[in-house]
Image (cartoon, rainbow, N blue to C red):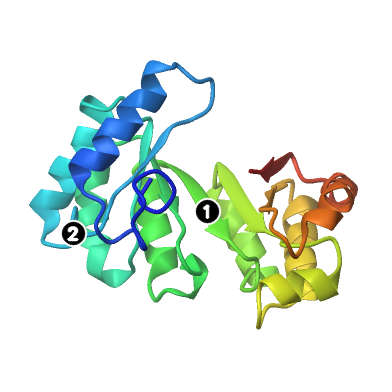
Amino acid sequence: VGTVVLGYESTLPVTMEDMLHHTKAVTRAKPSALVVGDMPFMSYQAGVEQAVINAGRFVQEAGADAIKLEGGERVAESVRRIVEAGIPYAAFGGGEPLGVAHSWDLFDILTNGGVALKLETDGSRIDEAAADRIAGLAIQCVQISVDGATAATHERVRPGSSFTATIAAIRRLTARQQPPQFVFVPNRFNLHESVAAFDLAVDLGCNTFVTG
């Protein structure tokens, strides 16, 4: 919304009113997909009460099925209260959520409260132990970003990443009956590998190929 629709240089200027307006437009179209409201900057950072109210606005006013927020220990109490308020679904993304301290504690809080989880990750931190924990939590949706069908392209688009580690993470989850979604965002560096990326997702047993 911020950079593509409103023309901002970053997402920081986006307000709750902006997000509610655009989320309403999506839900009025009555899509079959799950609609997740992405809580903007300073819509939950000021305190627990603010977080619960704004999460509720996404569901009540905009018709969102779920909300998304970012943070570790500092948002733990907000997460608890949002669960108590009956928000049915939460998504974790932005940066690398599994690298945030206390992320697993938040996942436990949410799943114990009956909230369905979506996890957006680059897969770099999904070792055998993490794969076991994800399977044990029965996270509803895991999306893993893969920026190419080859190591050279993936690592060019995502500097510092490991294609081998990402593919290994997908294999670990699939082996535990938790096949992730394969997220491929085309750009000028990887567009030529779009078809090969789709074929790779199929070969790995991913349940969905997400692009756009």
How far apart marks 1 and 2 lie (CA) works out to 22 Å
Q: Residue at x 20, y 44 (%)?
A: 16
Mark positioned earlier in the residue sequence (1 or 2) = 2
Q: Quadrant of residue 63?
A: top left
As drawn, is 4 to the left or to the right of 188? left
Return the x and y of residue 204 as percentages of the image width and height: 85, 52
Q: Nearer the viewer, residue 24 or 136?
A: 24
Crowdedness near tag 2: few (<14), some (14–19) or many (≥20) residues, C-alpha within 10 Å: some
Q: Residue at x 69, y 71 (%)?
A: 157
Q: Quadrant of residue 5?
A: top left
Residue 17 visible somewhere in the drawing: yes
Look at the picture and state if 170 lies above or below 202.
Answer: below
Dot 2: element: loop
Look at the picture and state if 129 lies above or below 1.
Answer: below
- Between tags 1 and 2, which lies in front? 2
Q: Please state, as top left, top right, bottom left or bottom right, where the C terminus lies in the image.
A: top right
Q: Amino acid at mark 2?
A: Met
Crowdedness near tag 1: few (<14), some (14–19) or many (≥20) residues, C-alpha within 10 Å: many
Dot 1: element: strand
As drawn, is 120 to the left or to the right of 178? left
Return the x and y of residue 121 as percentages of the image width and height: 57, 62
Q: Circle 1 is placed at which residue position?
A: 119
Q: Please state, as top left, top right, bottom left or bottom right, where the N terminus lies in the image.
A: top left
Return the x and y of residue 97 as percentages of the image width and height: 47, 66
Q: Residue at x 54, y 56 (%)?
A: 120
Q: Circle 2 is placed at which residue position?
A: 42
As drawn, is 40 to the left or to the right of 54? right
Q: Nearer the viewer, residue 156 or 205?
A: 156
Query: Residue 208: which disc?
Result: none
Return the x and y of residue 31 as percentages of the image width and height: 50, 20
Q: Amino acid at mark 1?
A: Leu
